Image (cartoon, grey):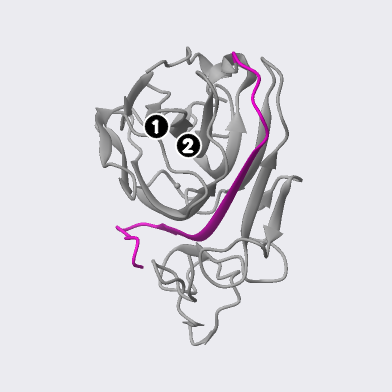
């Protein structure tokens, strides 16, 4: 992903039963929340609390090393669990869920809200892609939220621009992350808020030709920039909202 598309190494986040800090509502669309809340059934364009017996493959494309996990949940009984084994230097590793419905009809502004739990941060100068919106065809450029050992960064692959919070995400606890993307060939933006320090990349090229279409969540290590052997990583994601207007950690 990033490394293969020309990014040099840049040295420079429970409980309850609803969708926000308490969790998804027990009633979604007038029926008990099954967790595979899908697109439009919960007052948002897409939402999922992973409470159905399996991750909803009508909504998500799911990597083989992503599972529904009942040992961890921000709310309800389960979350999506992403696991990547230890990686040698210069080796790719990924565990992702992604969807293409939000941007199927064109590149539109969207907000992605997710509760995230990370067991260990990347070591040394490695980085881990946590969220991205990316082209499906070459040159596979995109917009990214990157987790590092001492920083949390927004990266715009179209302009090779980044900004960081100068703060690492905490480990072994649930954090709310809100990632906003306004995809435009010029004058676009990427922003991060929630439990992380608020940062933004503004007036950038955040889209191109072909346009961005994939929205992904999980773990991705690009071996091109994995300069240090990386121990195994586990990430849990819960209470996901993707919407065409602003969302909050309490939604």
Q: Please give the name of the residue rendered at 45% of the width and 78% of the height, measured from the top-left corner.
A: 25
Q: Position of residue 28 (x, y in %)?
A: 49, 80
What residue is shown with label 1? Answer: 207
Disc 2 crowd, CA 10 A, few/some/many (<14, 14-19, 20+): many
Left or right of 150, for residue 82: right
Q: Is residue 204 placed above or below 47 in the rendered structure? A: above
What residue is shown with label 2? Answer: 212
Specify the segment rendered in magenta. Answer: 227-251
Q: Is residue 36 placed above or below 163 in the rendered structure? A: below
Q: Earlier in the sequence, mark 2 or mark 1?
A: 1
Callout 2 secondary element: strand
Figure quadrant of the C terminus: bottom left
Task: Answer whether residue 180 is magenta in the image.
Answer: no
Task: Answer whether residue 248 is magenta in the image.
Answer: yes
Figure quadrant of the N terminus: top right
Q: Could you tell me how many numbered marks the image carries?
A: 2
Q: Position of residue 67 (x, y in %)?
A: 71, 54
In this view, the residue in front, 76 or 144, is 76
In this view, the residue in front, 96 or 228, is 228
Q: Please give the name of the residue rendered at 68% of the width and 34% of the height, measured from the top-left corner.
A: 232
In this view, the residue in front, 86 or 9, is 86
Q: Position of residue 103 (x, y in %)?
A: 47, 48
In this view, the residue in front, 185 or 227, is 227
Q: Are marks 2 and 1 in contact (CB under 8 Å)?
A: yes
């Amino acid at each position: 992903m990033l490394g293969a598309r020309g990014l040099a190494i840049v040295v420079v986040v429970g409980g309850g039963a609803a969708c926000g800090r308490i969790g998804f509502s027990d009633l979604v669309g007038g029926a008990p929340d099954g967790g595979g809340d899908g697109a439009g059934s919960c007052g948002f364009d897409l939402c999922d609390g992973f409470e159905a017996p399996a991750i909803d493959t009508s909504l998500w494309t799911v990597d083989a090393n992503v599972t529904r996990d009942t040992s961890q949940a921000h709310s309800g009984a389960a979350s999506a669990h992403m696991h990547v084994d230890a990686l040698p230097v210069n080796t790719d590793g990924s565990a992702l869920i992604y969807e293409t419905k939000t941007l199927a009809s064109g590149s539109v502004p969207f907000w992605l809200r997710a509760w995230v739990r990370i067991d260990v941060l990347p070591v040394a100068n490695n980085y881990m892609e946590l969220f991205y919106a990316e082209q499906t065809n070459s040159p596979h450029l995109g917009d990214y939220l990157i987790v590092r050992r001492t920083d949390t960064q927004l990266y715009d692959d179209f302009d090779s621009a980044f900004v960081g919070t100068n703060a690492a995400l905490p480990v072994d606890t649930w954090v709310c992350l809100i990632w906003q993307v306004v995809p435009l060939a010029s004058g676009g933006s990427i922003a991060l808020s929630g439990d992380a320090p608020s940062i933004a990349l503004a007036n950038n090229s955040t889209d191109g030709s072909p346009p961005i279409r994939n929205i992904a969540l999980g773990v991705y290590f690009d071996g091109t920039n994995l300069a240090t052997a990386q121990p195994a990583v586990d990430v849990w994601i819960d209470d996901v909202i993707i919407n065409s207007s602003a969302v909050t950690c309490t939604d």
